[in-house]
Amino acid sequence: MNYCESPFAYRRRLTREVVVGDPARGGVIIGGQHPIVKQSMITCDTMDTAACVKETLALVAVGCEMVRITAPTVKDAANLEPVVAELRQRDCWVPIVADIHFKPEAALEAAKWVEKVRVNPGNYADSKKFAVKEYTDAQYAAELARLEDKFTPLVQLCCRLGRAMRIGTNHGSLSDRILNRYGDTPAGMVESALEFARICRQHDYHNFVFSMKASNPKVMIECYRLLVARLEELGPDWNYPIHLGVTEAGEGEDGRIKSAIGIGSLLCDGLGDTIRVSLTEDSPHEIPVCRDLLAQVPALTSPVAPAGDASSRPNLGYDPFNYARRESAEVELGGVRCGGESVVRVVVPRTTFEKVAPKISPKADVKPEAVYEDLGVLEVDPEDDRCLAQVTTDRQLIAVKDRIRLPVITAYRLLAARLAAGQRRNPILLKDCLATEPGPLSPEVALLRAAVNIGALLADGIGDAILVRGEPGAGASLRLAYNILQAAGCRSFKTDYVACPSCGRTLFNLQTVTARIKSRTEHLKGVKIAIMGCIVNGPGEMADADFGYVGGAPGKINLYVGKTPVKFNIPEAEAVDRLVDLIREHGKWVEREVVNA
């Protein structure tokens, strides 16, 4: 299976065009040769018309090209009529997307007023019961017939009115039918989307896009690759556009890094026609990150393939559809082990070490683990056979040489492939850049480039140590390296938060509550806490979280251990304390260490 034309050279995937609204009056065309569309979502109550208009205009003012509004009920969906009418009266023609979960009736109402409808196949026609059931082929077919009865009216209405649609599966919110046949897997997510797409195609409706969102960037990358590979297998007329996003990415640097790893790596492989960076912040903050991320793609890719024709180029040294860390020999790095079963290590240049070392406590979790200049790293050009001939033992740490013609991701993929072809298991040191920058990067750009380059390779299973040099600040570069490893699931040195962006379904102030929870729990190394505004994606997207804080009703919170709800309807004023109690009950709590001045 192939998910892109070449993992070594940039070619944007050519898709059919999906029209959203009237392009002559501010609508957009997704796919084809058109620019990648930036989108976001407003956070207010959908019944508050004035607030919806105000937030939409604020997003458009910063460059948002498509705005999503939740429609949890038929009443909310009906109120999209005055919202859209007021926007058009103000000469704002940005396409509006209705976000639908659970209620087909709300989708049918919303489609009357908006240019696009997003449906989640996991809950559009199915209530979530987490039921364990083995389906016979006949029972499964009966479930699909029921699905078709529920979904066909929306397809026919969108056909008639010229509306677009997003078929958007979410990791963790798959139907019981899919879960019981495929498990909570990328294959299940893809099949869930294809079930809905087949119904669309039966009615000659093709004005739709796919998405495969997850809060774990590695899972998200696998899902999109598998989706595109399956579409390629189904035939050339299955070339539907793709919307990219890492859901529940969180806030601040962590949210940006997770999004850069997931979205950026796929963009560099030529996938993606519209994107959203989901941050637990005011939604206008998402658009500059989208813009900066898109701007990096030309600098991080090249349309020129490595030397040699396709037949002489080595096969990939990894499976792009099933994550596994590349096997490597273990070596000593100045007091720490690298490669083999060891965690991915953090290496710094000597200049960085000299600046940060005097300020770091011996007990610190964020600290340099090796100095680059002391390691005797063998640097090679993976296109140069003479360079590769210097690799005579697996006990040699290898990196890509600076100032070669290949971009970082291509160079390291080629290096791993060439080593695999020679049956070499050398540990690999990843660099965020190959010293080709004309000058210092801004912190925002340095973060995104490092996260895309290193994160994409870690998601491929490549890398035993990392070196961040693009960020000019010594302390900032060290912290960035650890944050990339945490976001990629390679190290856990601090509390990990899965926090959704706010929307009109949210039952509490996500930014305030997230800050409150962090202030109480951010010292808990290795604990993962999910903070979910409502039940729609709560239990599912918390799939690998240790504990969950989920809005259950206005002013009421449900607490989870893993996917299991254990405490219900806790008053919001008490909920953070009860969360701490729950963490303590399960043996994950430690007291914050007091540092004497």
Image (spheres, grey):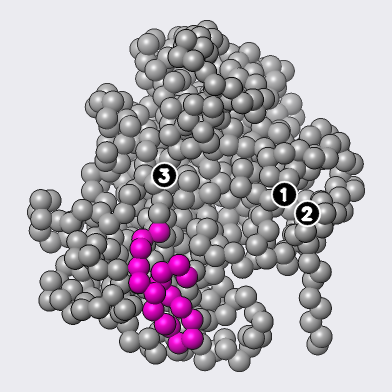
Q: Is 330 within the magenta?
A: yes
Q: Residue at x 35, y 72 (%)?
A: 329
Residue 206 position in % (x across, y down): 37, 20
State how far apart marks 1 and 3 are (Cα).
25 Å
Residue 586 image label? 2
- Indicate the amino acid at tag 2: His
Residue occupied by mark 1: 547
Residues marked 1 and 3 touching at CB (< 8 Å)? no
Which portion, as a residue range, is magenta?
Answer: 325-342
Residue drawn 12% across the image and 61% down it: 307
Determine whether, in the image, residue 388 is placed left or right of residue 138: left
Judge by depth and name the residue closer to the eye, 22 or 314: 314
Q: Viewer-nearest of labels 1 and 2?
A: 2
Q: Earlier in the sequence, mark 1 or mark 2?
A: 1
Q: Is residue 415 left or right of residue 125?
A: left
User: Which of the marked residues, 1 or 3, is nearer the chain's N terminus?
Assistant: 3
Residue picked out by circle 3: 222
Please tell me how crowded label 3 is: few (under 14), some (14-19), or many (20+) other residues with Cα within 10 Å.
many
Q: Element at badge 3?
A: helix
Q: Position of residue 209 (x, y in %)?
A: 42, 29
Q: Main secondary structure of the magenta part?
A: loop
Labelled pair 1, 2 in contact (Cβ < 8 Å): yes
Q: CA distance from mark 3 to mark 2?
A: 32 Å
Asked if residue 26 lies in the magenta stretch, the reply is no
Counting from the top left corner in percent of width and height, residue 374 is at 39, 90
Q: Quadrant of residue 591?
A: bottom right
The one of 302 and 359 positioned closer to us in this rendering: 359
Does residue 136 show up? yes
Q: Earlier in the sequence, mark 3 or mark 2?
A: 3
- The three-letter code of the residue at mark 3 reads Glu
